[in-house]
Amino acid sequence: MRPLRRADPSTIAGYRLLGRLGAGGMGVVFLARSGGGTLAAVKLIRAEHAADPGFRERFRREARAAERITGRWVVRVLGSDPEAREPWLATEYVPGPSLAEAIALHGALPEPTVRALGARLASALDDMHRAGLVHRDVKPGNVLLALDGPRLIDFGIARSAGATALTATDAMIGTPGFLAPEQARAAGAGEVGPASDVFSLGCVLAYALTGERPFGTGGVAAVVYRTVHEEPDLTGVPDALLPLVTACLAKNPADRPPAAEAGAALGRADGPAGDWLPPGLPALIAERSSRALDLPVAEPTLLGPSEPSRGMSRRKLLVGGSAAAVVGAGGLTAWLLNRGPAGTGTGTEKGTGTALPRYTIGVLTDLSGPTKLLGRAQERGARVAVESFNARPDRAFDLVLRTVDDGGDGVRATAAARTLLKDENLIGVLGPTTVPSALAAVAELVDHFVPLVSVLASVPTGTTVEGQTIKRTYFEPRASPDSMIVPFARYLSEREIVRTALVEDRAGGRYTWFAAKSMRDTPPSQARGGVATSHPVEKDDEDFASAVRAALATGPQGVMYVGNSPRRAALCAKALRDQGYQGLRGSVEYVLQPEFLALAGPAAEGWFFGTGYADPDGIPAAKPFTALYRKRWGLAPTTPVEPYATEAYDAVNWTLQALHTTLGNHAESEATGVANSLRQNPYQGLVKTYSSAGRESSAASLVGLFLWQVKDGVPRFLGEFAKAALAGA
């Protein structure tokens, strides 16, 4: 819940407003208390939208639809006035989180919970369908979790089956990813019926069971296409529920079971609630309930005669008794911080009567494209950081992790960034895996002052990043890829290698040219007369044997593959082995991929690599993280933590440090304050020190470089490159 804003009313039709529960395109939803003390959620349509006949009719329809539904598993209507200057609708207040929030905070739900959830939602839909209504927007955000079961909310686009829609011709109705194919095709009104809600129910069940949308994420067009033309991804759905979920997701509406039949297959909807929720969620609901019951009744808003000076409140709330005055956002922030920062053990919410604020960190990354393994690792590392923070009883706020898939594509990244910006609680984004994604995301986020932190993608030096000349919102706390030649070169220097041969793979374009030039200009052991010779392989040629033969003719003590192709590097490795070279050899992170190890086979043995990521198992301070990570993702103790998962974990905690600083400074905008703090304040993470100096400082470009070696066919972490190079020298 967020505090009221200056322009918000104090009361609506006798309901005293206590705070904001959320805001959307039509209006704002407030937490309120009736004259009799009942808590309510009051939706208020903004005056500018109420003047639009279409908006008013939609709201009028929502009120009528909600009043017609009296089932146990929908929110009960307490009152409404669709004809008021600013129309309003009051429903009972459900203090629990939405299903979307619960999964964001706690991950996928166990099968018994989903069975109870689905049976009750199916019952709610059956009640609607019997009343002649179709919900048309069944999704996790419209399902609230209470101690006794879920509640279906938001009937804004519900209508009578067969009625004419109030949307424009060919307009799509519903939420992509949870709407039926007939909705995605913007079909005629007659095609969108009860079976459409059943399809959405199937999507919700799959999402609750796996934590993933069955038709993936990404741009609206891509999700809609998959919904209409492709089969859902039901990986992770238990075998016992797979037939039902599959039936609900049938492309043909006639092949889907009715809501009542789907509910019967899941279990009884009218049975005792019991402990249907998994550990953690009942405590969250109970805690929020107790806070809501303890909320003081605010006095009417008092506006001063003139605009307050900078740094002062824009809204004054007078509270009676022993309660202290909370002055606007700044006062609320000061109150939160007086509880003590998370981890001190001094903060408590007990008896304050105020729900924890929520802030969102976005992960914009590749989950379906060529870099999806790295994208998944980043999302996993970030999620562990968020869940660890939310588990702290002394935290001052809750974090929500919102992930969008860009497929590693710049166009999709633009749409993904816009999706994230719809969340008014967004305070930062991390995770691009490719340069096009990073550049596209920055271009969308910069005007909203939302920072983007990239621990993997690295924009080449000299490339213009939009909007970064005045307002700094892009942060790249990683070593430059151009510097990844340094770890192996340093290793050679510490062993006084004076003759280095470079197999220059010109298929690598700019990267190869720059890396080869750097090695020739500053070869290993330069002070001792070191020299590096270059032996090219043209981009349309795969004759590495000839280049290796020429390289070995110089009598090298060390050989470096200079390029970025794992496959072509494997050809180089095989050529070196075939020609009997057994000396030092190495390359960079681009090459250290499963493809290189598989294709090179025994020829990969002994190779050294410089990387921008670390192995947390080789860092003593990261031991708690590795244990938590493996437990969270069900990994064996010997399974390596994926590249960039630890760095993403650190990036979330750097952003958290910035958010704490922002709240302490009473910033008007949390996102802007976080960006400013990231620019000014470094953070000591598990892997390295994170700062904003990476793109501007040559010294900073070497922070976070590590050395690895292939031993027994497996990459082994040797440590921070300078220390690793000295070891055994």
Image (spheres, helix red, strand yellow):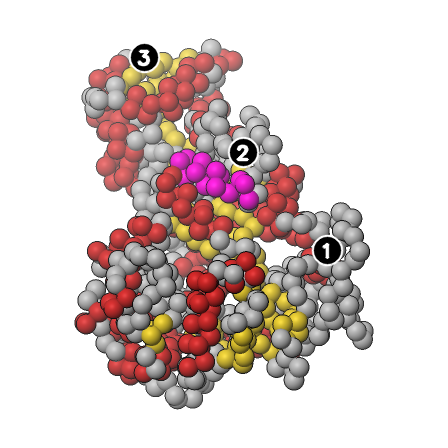
Residues at circles 2 and 3 in contact by the CB criterion of under 8 Å: no
Label 1 close to label 3 by CB (< 8 Å): no
Please say if 67 is above or below 333. below
Q: Which mark is residue 527?
A: none
- Secondary structure under tag 3 reads loop
| Tag shown at residue 314 | 1
Q: Secondary structure at mark 1?
A: loop
Where does the image place residue 674, in percent across and percent down from the top left? 61, 46
The reply, left or right, for residue 416 in relation to residue 235 is right
Give, as a single range, the part of the protein colored magenta. Answer: 435-448
Observer-nearest of 529 and 143: 143
Q: Residues within 10 Å of mark 3 (few under 14, many from 20)?
A: few
Q: Earlier in the sequence, mark 1 or mark 2?
A: 1
> How many residues crowd mark 1 within 10 Å: few (<14), some (14–19), many (20+)?
some
In the rendered image, residue 437 lying in the magenta stretch gets the answer yes
- Check disc 3 and report the residue beneath it: 554
